[in-house]
Image (cartoon, grey):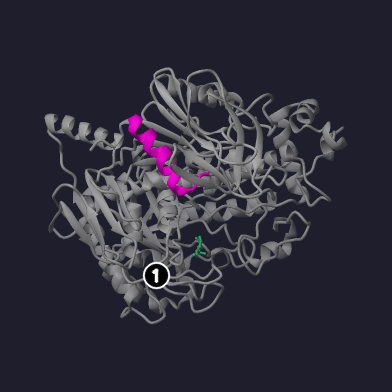
Amino acid sequence: MFSSSHSLTGLTDRSGLIFGADYNPEQWPAATWPEDIRLMQEAGINMVTVGVFSWARLEPSEGARNFGWLDHLMDLLHGGGIRVCLATPTASPPAWLGHEYPETLPVDADGSTLWYGSRNQFNPSSAKYRQAAAAITESLARRYAGHPAVAMWHVGNELGQVSYDDETALGFRTWLTRRYATLDRLNQSWGTAFWSQAYGSWEEILPPRKAPYLINPSQKLDFQRFTSAQLLSLYRAERDIIRRYDTRCPVTTNLMGFFRGADYFAFAKETDVVANDWYTDPADPDSHRLGALTHDLCRGLSGGMPWLLMESATSAVNWREHNVPKEPGELRVDALSAVARGADGVCFFQFRQSRFGAERFHSAVVPLAGENTRAFREVAELGKELRSLRQVAGTSCAATIAVLFDWESWWAAESPDTPTNRLQVLEQLQAYYAPLHRRGLSVEVVHPSAELGRYGLVVAPSLFLLAPEHSNSLAAYVRGGGQLVVGPFSAVADSNGHLADGRFPGSLADLLGVDGEEWVPLASPVEVRFGPIQAVQAHIWAEDLALRGNTGKVMAHFGAGRLEGRPAVVRNCHGAGSSWYVGADLPAEALELVLADALAAAGIASPLTAPLPDPVEAASRGGHLFLLNHSARPQEVGLGWTSVDLLTGTAHGPELTLPPFGALVLKEPVPTQTGAAELSNLKNDRNRGTA
Ligand code: GLA
């Protein structure tokens, strides 16, 4: 991936940041298309995604081809200077496919078929579906590769379907034979000695279908791996067909951030551009922080390279229970947040609001009310601003902090047989990310196999499953001078989901200097004391811990109750670095303390002199500090230096006020050598609390 010819660079070099939308013109008479193109130009849109749901139009009956309308559209778009991200239409097969070939339809864990009349009604393991998808992809690639409008290819849509049918069972067995070679190894890896589950032949093995009671967790984990691999193989098959015809344009598929169903670290290795869909929830005041974390995941997935926000909403979506529209100005800060965190483009779903179908009530660039609307005006204004940010395209964010995340561990951690279902992986991730986000620090979410040496601080909020090579690399990182923070219930299981023997946290116990005996899900809150004055409460989770060896220091201990006086947070010295182990679900104010201690040890300081007010986001990219107010109230920010806003040319600082949903893109000072040393001393002092 990321060869220069197949990255975003080729596109942004020519036109600056990408600004786009999903365009579904088949819902409208062809006579409206020229008007659509005029509106795209007016909004500054320079790329549209076309054809995502066009299969029935392109192939009205098996083997038929109807490309005339698309030929016309592509030429119109090209004539209007709008580039096309051309999609394969394979996310929504036509009714005839499901009708003629019911085996192409997915079946759920209860054995119920999921029928057409919606979308995503495909079985990833169906040979017939794969054949039909390959055929239409090939026709499309053959016809449009080299068309001057085509700038990028978009395979399917949000690949995430799962099926438990018989053909899937066959595929699962083949996958298992490759993984285990012998039934003996499979039986051992799945722990089938338990509950008399031993398999005597491969044919007996099934996907984890609905069962009377708890299902074997190792079987479920493998099925999750298999499903993710099947989805990736769908992507690969279509990508390879496209590549045969077009060796020039990047090929990608739109990811869904922290989507549990597929391992995006594996996907990212196969896509030329990491493209992601993110929908802020305007009803949730913290949604922008999950957005920032998701964007930092995209940067981690893309190895620090620019990525693309492939879908977002101009205002309300239609698929939450209660769909609150965005406030005036909110779409702008949402979009700039992605750019600040490495996106080289921002696209909306969708260009023109549908009048019919299941997304009638979804917002769009052009709402039913037309162009004289707040949504359209705000999009057009954003289009202008993105043009003024041209120099940001292609730049990096230089993260100093890694947050570790692993899909396999997520799959394994959230199993109904674990001590609690309240300690959720994503919630842990967000809790440990918040203190870093509040300081405007540059973070990448990366896999535990990433090269850690380039980060000053590594945070592992929840790694239930940890391979020996990854715990070794964490130990080497700390020994070499790194700082590591590890959250509760970590290093619990191996890659089969079998629990580590002995005292916990298993392979990390020596590194972290702790010795755990029992996990303690809480019936009622327990106090966690940081020194004599500061006390907080853990609500869900505690661990019965002791110090291991003599290098650890108790940073916090439990208050009254069965764990009274036992360590809750342990800071340990290991080689030239230190680690923190947190044996409880700590509230935000306590995680602040732990991370402040770790940041100080790492010598990492915020780019701002004063703490940021909560709804303000700060992120550095390409020598610029983006300051974004995600609230409808003005916010005071202590910047500590003066600068000029790239968007307006206006000078600001050292103190400034951000208007409601205000945004600034400030040139960061380039420190002189002595200045740099002074700045770093000042930052370290501040971190130690002496300034
Ligand atoms: C997803 C899909 C789009 C559309 C939007 C609506 O991201 O990819 O096709 O359904 O949601 O928000």
Asked if residue 368 is among those painted magenta in the image, a careful observer would answer: no
**Vertical relation: 548 (above or below) 352:** above
Amino acid type, residue under disc 1 in the picture:
Lys
**Vertical relation: 58 (above or below) 519:** below
Residue labelled 1 has its Cβ within 8 Å of some atom of ligand 1: no
Q: Position of residue 342 (x, y in %)?
A: 34, 47
Q: How many marks?
A: 1
Q: Position of residue 18 (x, y in %)?
A: 32, 55
Which residue does the image show at 40% across and 67% down from the upper left? Answer: 73
Left or right of 611, for residue 240: right
Q: Position of residue 6 (x, y in %)?
A: 38, 42
Give the labeled residue for mark 1: 326
Quadrant where the image shows the C terminus = top left
Q: How many C-alpha atoms fall within 10 Å of the one at disc 1: few (<14), some, or many (≥20)?
A: many
Residues rendered magenta in the picture? 586-602
Mainly helix, strand or loop, the magenta region? helix
Which residue does the image show at 22% across and 57% down from the upper left? Answer: 664
Residue in front for this viewpoint, 354 or 576: 576
What element does badge 1 sit on?
Answer: loop
Splitting the image into 4 quarters, where does residue 230 fall? top right
Which residue does the image show at 28% across and 69% down from the upper left? Answer: 380
Splitting the image into 4 quarters, where does residue 410 fall? top right
Which residue does the image show at 31% across and 44% down from the upper left? Answer: 9
Q: Position of residue 547 (x, y in %)?
A: 55, 24
Residue in front for this viewpoint, 605 or 152: 605
Left or right of 39, for residue 364: right
Quadrant where the image shows the N terminus = top left
Left or right of 76, for residue 127: right
